[in-house]
Amino acid sequence: MSNRQETYLFGQGRVEIAERTGATLGEWVWLGDVSDMSLSFEEEKFTHKESYSGQRSDVRELSVGTSLNTSLTIHELSAENVARFTRGTVTAIAEGTVTDESLGTVAAGDIVQLENLGVSDLVISDSTAVPATIDPEHYSVDPFGEVVFTTLPTPLPTMPLLASYKHTSAQQATFLSGSKKEYALRYKGENLAENNKPILVELYKVSPSLLQTLSLITSGNQLASAPVEFKPLLDTSKSVSDGLGQYGRMVTVGY
């Protein structure tokens, strides 16, 4: 009788991704908090039924292909992650100062969108040779750079009105503005069921699907999340016989 001890898996850890260009990997990047990672294996097969007994019984099952899928649930909805999984691009907007941005001709009750967000120290003036400053009691501004004019002073200021202000830095992720990319994916985990022993899973070449859902409004005690599906592909740059395989591998350390 074997005296082998049973083992269990209760995994926690970091999931990292690296962009592939051909067989060359870029920098590994941590995806942040990932609450779920799973692999699924599929086999394409067909069954042959005999035609001599009158029972049409199954006599052969033939495998004609295998495939692998993986899925993640990510919680770090940073501009980089959103752009990465929506085939978008990230633009960094530096903090700065704007002088005399034209607001056009404004009437009481109008809402005007400034060109930047995170606005502070807003001063609105008219277009006279010696600009007259509009008292802030006539308008308000929100964090999204939207100015609401509740009233206008009397006599009416000379149009167009001009806005000068400071704005914070920002990151912008556009949707569906880039091309499809391939990545490598790896999980550097700890098995809490076995004294936190290390566990490594590598997928050498994966093609991510678009985000299935980008949760933006949540309720209860659930944080926003986004599920992502990946299709592992055969990495022909690796040898069939080197022990690493051509799709990926799982390494359990110290067992």
Image (cartoon, rainbow, N blue to C red):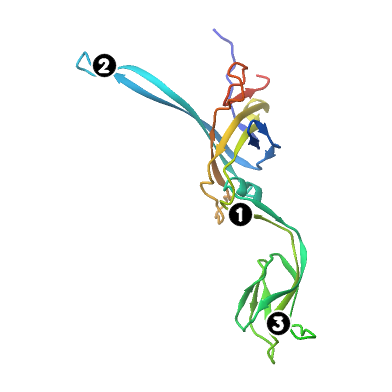
Residue ID for mark 2: 50
Q: Amino acid at mark 3?
A: Glu
Q: Return the disc, 1 or 2, that comes first in the chain's sequence.
A: 2
Q: Position of residue 66 (x, y in %)?
A: 47, 25
Q: Residue furthest right?
A: 130
Q: Is residue 203 left or right of residue 40?
A: right
Asked if 130 appears above or below 144 in the picture, the reply is below
Q: Could you tell me how far apart the alpha carbons at marks 1 and 3 are, in whole angstroms? A: 36 Å
Residue at (67, 70) in percent of width and height:
114
Q: Nearer the viewer, residue 10 or 213?
A: 213
Q: Position of residue 60 (x, y in %)?
A: 34, 16
Q: In the picture, residue 112 is in which quadrant?
A: bottom right
Q: In the picture, residue 142 is in which quadrant?
A: bottom right
Q: Residue furthest top?
A: 1
Asked if 246 appears above or below 89 in the picture, the reply is above
Residue 174: which disc?
A: 1
- Answer yes or no: do the residues labelled 1 and 2 have beta carbons within 8 Å? no
Residue at (65, 66) in percent of width and height:
144
Q: Amino acid at mark 2?
A: Glu
Q: Could you tell me how far apart the alpha carbons at marks 3 and 2 are, in whole angstroms? A: 89 Å
Residue at (65, 41) in percent of width and height:
31
Q: Amino acid at mark 1?
A: Thr
Residue 137: which disc?
A: 3
- Answer yes or no: do the residues labelled 3 and 2 have beta carbons within 8 Å? no
Q: Return the disc, 3 or 2, that comes first in the chain's sequence.
A: 2
Q: Would you call the spot at circle 1 few (<14 residues within 10 Å), some (14-19), or many (20 or more)?
A: some
Q: Could you tell me how far apart the alpha carbons at marks 1 and 2 are, in whole angstroms? A: 57 Å
Mark in the foreground, 3 or 2: 2
Mark in the foreground, 1 or 3: 1
